[in-house]
Amino acid sequence: MELVFGWMPFALLGLVVAGFAVYLIVSRGRRRRSDTTVLAAAHVERLFALPEYRRAYRRGRVLFAGLIAVSLFALSGLAIVAARPVTTDVVTTETANRDIVLCLDVSGSMLGDDAEVLDQFRTIAKGFSGERISLVIWNASAVQVFPLTDDYSYVDEQLKTVADAAAEADRLGYYPDPQEGSFDLLSGTLLGSGSSLIGDGLASCVLRFDNTDSERSRTVLLATDNELYGEPLVTLDEASRFAQERKVRVYALTPSFLGISTPEKRELEQESEATGGKLFGLDDARAADEIVKRVLADQASKLKGTPRLVITDEPGGALVVGILAVWLVAFIGWRMRT
């Protein structure tokens, strides 16, 4: 433990000494001056012959001595508190070495499902603690909504904003005008020909991971119906192999309308499992918990953060002594007056 303002007790001691010196000087000055208002009394010694007077006199002296002692305790306690006793510790935080990119298909065929997907994303994000999360939306081209971050309040706020825009688009049957305050789901996602270019979208999401030279757990959560319209630069199979090269696991999340077995669903399942991931349906009530469990099961080392100095105030017993002593000073003063 150390004192932030170590000079404070000495300053208060100096003030007490100075105050006492002023008191002595003023008292001597008064005694030297004649005071006509004070009359001398004769035979005062007879008062001490009275038992009640002697008891009152002794009681007064004891109270006065107690007042001085308790006042010193009060000053000592408050002086220590004013000096601000603290403890210091160097804390190095650790964060999980896992990154998750939420990869969302915002093509027209997903118009009625994106809001539900984003709500599922929010549920999944709440299951993590310390992992970094990013959101990428794509159609003919990909746009990063927010980069990898472990600020979960910001993540949830952004996911809710995009989910509200997707819900409004589903209600209207078309994407709302961003000038009316909605999130722009189209800006930057229509650069090129075609629509719902799944391979390009997945490859773009895989490229969003930073620190590629470090050992990290990397996961892409791909939400799409796998309905391809156009010629992609990268096929889904090529994007899957690219993810495997980058040691990225892909978990696919599909709308419930794909049914139990369709070519699109089988392809997604095959390519996600090739990366070590799995396919889940939006209608699976256990999907969010299962995805979180699988991601957390992937062993990840801890990243050490920047060491920081933590200063903790420790007034402790000095504050208690000071407060109690002040109360005792007030009580003794009241007793002396009465």
Image (cartoon, helix red, strand yellow):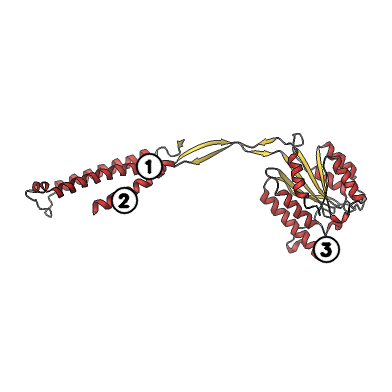
**Residue indicated by mark 1:** 77
- Is residue 9 found left or right of 100 in the rendered image? left
Tell me if mark 1 has few (under 14), some (14-19) or many (20+) residues whose alpha carbon lies within 10 angstroms of its own. Answer: many
Residue sitting nearer the eye, 214 or 23: 214
**Residue indicated by mark 2:** 330
Give how far apart the Cα atoms at labels 2 and 3 are. 76 Å
What's the residue at 93%, 50% (across, down)?
263
Q: Nearer the viewer, mark 3 or mark 1?
A: 1
Q: Which of marks 2 and 3 is in front?
A: 2
What's the residue at 77%, 36% (across, down)?
212
> Outermost residue, left direction?
42
Instruction: Give the amino acid type for the residue marked by disc 1 in the picture.
Output: Gly
What's the residue at 70%, 35% (across, down)?
301
Give how far apart the Cα atoms at labels 2 and 1 are. 16 Å
Instruction: Give the amino acid type for the residue marked by disc 2 in the picture.
Output: Ala
- Residue 17 position, x and y percent, is 29, 40
